[in-house]
């Protein structure tokens, strides 16, 4: 959660409602009260910012000429393109980068919060 104007706000996935950009996860920002993907060509897909892969289904990407399913942090993988939520494929597993932890299918920044916000699911906004 985040704290904005004295209120704690829950973290928000791409495509979901928000009040401040600090709530938005997976490389998204709060635009018109909704978390939208900020990465070039990325689109919201099942709560993730994903660059669509031509000729594969919406739940798949192309790896070595084949369509393979996207994988969340902790899941098996063949290549980085397959990993979502801010993770990369390391030793055949989608892994969060150093300084981030896996929670609910996303790699989240280790929270530094104040006040009465829940450190795992809330962040503090300006205000």
Image: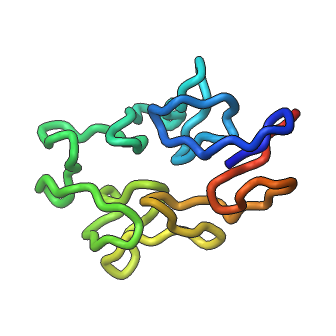
Is 9 placed above or below 78 here?
A: above
Which residue is the extreme one toward the front? 116
**Residue displayed at 51% across by 67% down:** 102
**Residue displayed at 38% across by 33% down:** 43
On the image, the x and y values in percent for residue 38 come to: 54, 34
Q: In this view, does 57 lie to the left or right of 33?
A: left
Is 112 placed above or below 37 here?
A: below
User: How many numbered dots are placed on residues in this image?
Assistant: 0
Which residue is the extreme one toward the top? 32
Q: In this view, does 87 lie to the left or right of 56?
A: right
Q: Nearest the camera: 10 or 73?
A: 10
Q: In which quarter of the image is residue 20?
A: top right
On the image, the x and y values in percent for residue 125 come to: 79, 40
Q: Is residue 74 left or right of residue 38?
A: left
Q: Nearest the camera: 20 or 49?
A: 20
On the image, the x and y values in percent for residue 9 come to: 68, 41
Quarter that holds the C terminus: top right
Q: Quadrant of residue 55?
A: top left
Which residue is the extreme one toward the bottom? 91
Q: Nearest the camera: 60 or 53?
A: 60
Is 78 placed above or below 10 here?
A: below
**What colour scheme was applied to this rendering of the protein?**
rainbow
**Residue displayed at 84% across by 37% down:** 126
On the image, the x and y values in percent for residue 98 come to: 61, 73
């Amino acid at each position: 959660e985040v704290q904005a104007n004295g209120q704690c706000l829950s973290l928000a996935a791409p495509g979901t409602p928000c009040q401040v950009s600090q709530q938005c996860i997976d490389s998204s920002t709060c635009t018109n009260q909704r978390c939208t993907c900020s990465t070039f060509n990325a689109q919201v897909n099942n709560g993730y910012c994903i660059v669509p892969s031509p000729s594969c289904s919406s739940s798949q990407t192309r790896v070595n000429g084949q369509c393979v399913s996207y994988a969340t942090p902790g899941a098996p993988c063949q290549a980085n393109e397959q990993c979502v939520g801010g993770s990369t494929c390391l030793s055949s597993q989608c892994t969060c980068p150093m300084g981030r932890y896996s929670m609910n299918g996303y790699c989240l920044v280790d929270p530094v919060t104040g006040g009465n916000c829940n450190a795992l699911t809330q962040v503090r906004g300006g205000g």
